[in-house]
Image: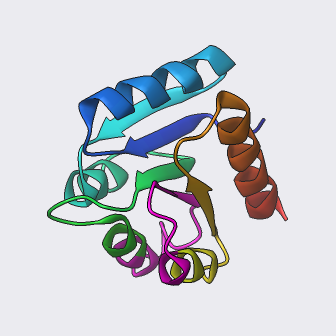
Amino acid sequence: MPVRTVLVVEDSPLTRRMIRRMLEQHGSLDVVEAGDGREAMEILNSQAVDIVLSDLHMEPMDGHGLMAEMRLHPALAHLPFIMMTAQHCPDSIRRTIGDHSSHYLPKPFTREQLYAALQRSSARQAA
């Protein structure tokens, strides 16, 4: 898998830790963490990241706000983005997958589903 650095944006420390463990079990991924969209933008503006894995519902900047902000910056505009949420709202799904660099990952998910989403996002970026 070509992805090396994954930014996990999740306001729940417990969920962030669970996702980090799943990603670290893959063996070839570095994980960077942010607690919300604003913190994620600070990280994205200061270090290289290969893919963003973000929760939808966070304060003060949610996942859609983060995705929109990223698309305004040329260096971040085409970065693969996976939106995670436990709420399966059709409008949120359409907003997420309407962006060609984005994927939707419903919670809860397995390690295999997470790896598959990373693989799809990486393949789309390479194409």
Q: Tell me residue 93's x, y (percent).
A: 56, 74
Can you see residue 117?
A: yes
Image point (77%, 45%), residue name = 119
Image point (48%, 68%), residue name = 75
Q: Tell me residue 23's x, y (percent).
A: 57, 26
Can you see residue 27?
A: no
> Magenta residues?
68-92
Q: Is residue 11 left or right of residue 121?
A: left
Tell me which corner region of the image, top left, top right, bottom left or bottom right, holds residue 55.
bottom left
Choose between 89 and 40: the one closer to the eye: 89
Choose between 32 and 64: the one closer to the eye: 64
Q: Is residue 21 left or right of residue 115?
A: left
- From what the image shows, is residue 115 above or below residue 36? above
* 71 part of magenta stretch: yes
Quadrant for the C terminus, please: bottom right
- The residue most toward the left is 60
Choose between 64 and 43: the one closer to the eye: 64
